Image (tube, helix red, strand yellow):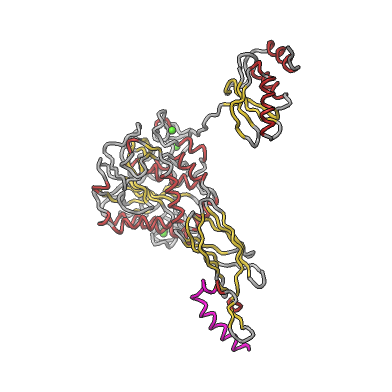
Amino acid sequence: MKYPLFWVLIFVVGVCSIATSAEDNLNNGQLLIQLEGDDPVTADQRLDQLETDFRLVQLRREKSLSKRLNIWLCTFDPSIFDETDVLQDIRRHRTVKQAQFNHHLTLRETVPDDPRFGSQWALHQANDHDIDAPEAWDLTTNTGTTALGDTIVIAVIDAGFHLSHPDLYFWKNYAEIPGNGIDDDDNGYVDDYDGWNAYSSSGSLYGHSHGTHVCGIAAARSNNALGVAGVNWNAQIMPVQGSSRSESTVIEAYGYVIEMRARYNETNGEEGAFVVSTNSSFGVDYGDPEDYPIWCALYDTMGTLGIISAGATANRGINIDVYGDVPTACPSNYLISVTNTTSSDGRYGSAGYGATTIDLGAPGTSILSTVSSSSYGYKTGTSMATPHVAGAVALLYAAATPEQIEAHHANPGASALLFREWLLAGVDSLPALQGITVTGGRLNIHKALLNVVQDELSQIQGTVTDQSTGLPLPAQIRAVGDQTVETTANAEGDFSLYLLAGDYHLEISYPDYVSYQTDFQVQHGQLITVEVALLERFQAFDLNQDGIFNIVDVQQLALDADRSLHDLQSFLEFWLENR
Ligand SMILES: [Ca+2]
Ligand SMILES: [Ca+2]
Ligand SMILES: [Ca+2]
Ligand SMILES: [Ca+2]
């Protein structure tokens, strides 16, 4: 019997070595082998040769891992020779480009150093009835700003807040000087440095354990070696008091949030605050949204500004579809209505549900968070479930790509709906919530984050030039569909717009030019490129040799019908003046 030379070597080395390997995370008896060449026919022959030459260790191909790269998963008997020696010999074989062991991978997860994190079952627990926070934080812990530098703010409307709690990070209105009786930033609110108190219509806030608890769940300062961790580690909380007494108080509270986000949008971030979510852990049991049209409509108003609101449903085990609730039965698309789940992934008995009204569940039973000025405590209720969602929205914005944030700036309302969709599509389905909530599941921030980072927006890009001169035109580009997005081409005539999948009417216009209009459909993740040459209005008309007006570009003028009469008149005036 003849053995190739390397088999002689392996025998010698084999008997001398101790049969252990240097690495302890191996799938024993498995190798990843990349073969020389990329021809599938010769790959088979090479594998036959390899298996024959290493038959003593029973080398077998298991499956192709990449045909293009010619990488195979192979097995061998690891008990015969030292695994490392087998690997070395296989690496020297003429058919082999590269070989290595098949290692175990572990799911990475980021566990913060907050000493009471171990008691926060909602974020992480052995039985996995949690929102998978460490897995999400593995994707991002730098959660205070967006990819384009917006400071992320969660507005919490509640009874009161312990502003000095060392484990909380409250937003401040630095454009306002506190306590001077003057509305320094001219936003309509005097001395609103800390936030707003809609009970007293003043900037003086006072402490309350309920609001403080809610804030810690959404965004306690995290990984700071103190107390608890929040869903979002670094977002700022805008505290707004006004969650009880009369409805007018609630309207005033939301009014403050609306003013600040609208200012942010209107001033390109110079003023106001980039509020991405609100939290309402209050409401009216058995409320009929039809009796609360102004309150309910606020969620749409906030939504179009780019704010997703999280609302706690009733702490009663009733069907909200039947019995009603405000705000969680309000019909707004920008509202996420939340019920309360337990550490065994059940619905807490005294928590509302509804197949058409209540979107999802989140942990709200025995939740540890910040309470009075420097302490911590447990609370139970839908009030505790909801801030997990408000914090999650803020986390998604932190993880979003620059393109996604750019799309948000261009059209905050449409973008906010997308973030809501990413969050709701990421739930863990639970038997306890099937059929009695919209999604049938419980919040999972890791899955929601993956939905964000793996998504690709559609894009339309192009160049606008003058049809006669070929020179670039800084034209206006406007796409109208489910959302309206618009931009201006730069000095080179180039433009780019991000938008959601859907049907659009595109209009590209420039003063004194015939505008270009077309209808198009864009698929998810699709890139559409358009090159547009606009025609100056005067040149759209010409006289032929018989002195009859000749419309140069009939199709474009037909699309631009509203303006063509005006153009014709202008041309006639011009012609009469200059003939
Ligand atoms: Ca988990
Ligand atoms: Ca002010
Ligand atoms: Ca002031
Ligand atoms: Ca902490």
Name the residue: 42% across, 37% down: 131
Is 143 above or below relative to 36?
Answer: below
Q: Where residue 446 appears, x then y in whole percent?
A: 46, 39
Q: Quadrant of residue 68?
A: top right
Q: Which residues are magenta?
A: 557-579
Name the residue: 49% across, 41% down: 450
Is 512 above or below relative to 475?
Answer: below
Side of 205 where 461 appears, left or right = right
Q: Main secondary structure of the magenta part?
A: helix
Which one is in front, 304 or 21? 21
Q: Where residue 226 appears, x then y in whole percent?
A: 45, 35
Residue at the far right in the pictured view = 5
Name the residue: 62% across, 83% down: 544
Which one is in front, 236 or 56? 56
Taking the image in four quarters, ligand 4 sits in the one at: top left
* Whether residue 268 is visible: yes
Which one is in front, 159 or 294? 294
Residue 573 lies within the magenta run: yes
Q: Quadrant of residue 429?
A: top left
Residue 138 lies within the magenta run: no
Image quarter of the N terminus: top right
Q: Quadrant of residue 376?
A: top left
Q: Where residue 289 appears, x then y in whole percent?
A: 27, 54
Image quarter of the C terminus: bottom right
Q: Where residue 465 appears, x then y in whole percent?
A: 63, 67
